[in-house]
Amino acid sequence: MAVFRKVLALGILMAGLLLTGFTYGPEEGNRVVYQIGFSYEEVPEDVRARMRGISYPEGCTVPFEDLRYLRMLYFDYNGQVQIGEMICNKAIAADVTEIFYNLYKGFYPIAKIRLVDEYGGDDTASMLDDNTSSFNYRVVEGTTHLSNHAYGLAIDLNPFYNPYVTHPNGGTVISPVGSEPYADRNAVFPHKIGPGDLAYEQFKAHGFTWGGDWKTVKDYQHFEKKQP
Ligand SMILES: [Zn+2]
């Protein structure tokens, strides 16, 4: 069974590569190819152009040199192989690439992995679309201090099924709208991150902390790592 799954994974991978024309080399320019379909590199100029004025606003204090552009294969919720794009900090680029390679090998379903710029830099819109992403130069919702996403040191995974729960003025706010059923972590539903889940185990094994472990605010989609 294990062999069958490996052969199946390889077949799907090759088909995906043929369809997408993904190029492979151990190192092309500054691109580090971790595995076929999994690479990170300095942010190319065309990608910088897509980010400027959106996730990378005027006056952004994080230099592009500290960021990396990742391309990674993943299985979507329909089991189809897709190519994801992500921007994260160079300090965690190797970790993130390895984690998502392990998720791919484990057939872990991910709704989509797109740059937040495709949502106009709007984190709420990205969450509503269940988009997995990292870098976005923004403050923590409801505060004035920079989020770890502003440094590309945090990842939000499958956010619609793993909402962000806060308690302003003693109330409860669950983001994004519509994800309220998934704030009940005792409920059984797909794509739930937590102990025993492959993504949870992978991020933990790579030294990330999980927002679901926070004491008051709960951010079930969120993993972050301190810069070494
Ligand atoms: Zn987050």
Image (spheres, rainbow, N blue to C red):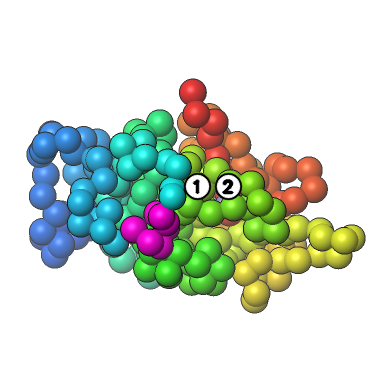
Occupied quadrant, residue 142: bottom right
158 sits to left or right of 45: right
Q: Which mark is residue 95?
A: none
Vertical placement of residue 37 versus 226, above or below? below
Q: Where is residue 202 in the image (x, y as percent from the top left)?
A: 49, 38
Give whichever of 149, 5 is nearer the camera.
Answer: 149
Q: Residue 147 carries which label?
A: 2
Q: Does the magenta stretch include residue 55?
A: yes
Give the CA separation, mark 1 to mark 2: 5 Å
124 sits to left or right of 78: right
Q: Which residue is drawn at the image coordinates 51% and 48% (left, top)?
A: 149
Bounds of the magenta segment: 51-58
Q: Which mark is residue 150?
A: 1
Give whichever of 206, 173 is nearer the camera.
Answer: 173
Q: Position of residue 50 (x, y in %)?
A: 29, 61
Residue 8 showing in the rendered view: no
* Circle 2 residues within 10 Å: few <14, some 14–19, many ≥20: some
At label 2, the amino acid type is Ser
Q: Does the magenta stretch include residue 52?
A: yes
Q: Position of residue 27 (x, y in %)?
A: 13, 34
Main SS class of the magenta portion in the image? loop
- Considering the numbered disc 2 on the image, is that residue within a helix, a strand or a loop? loop
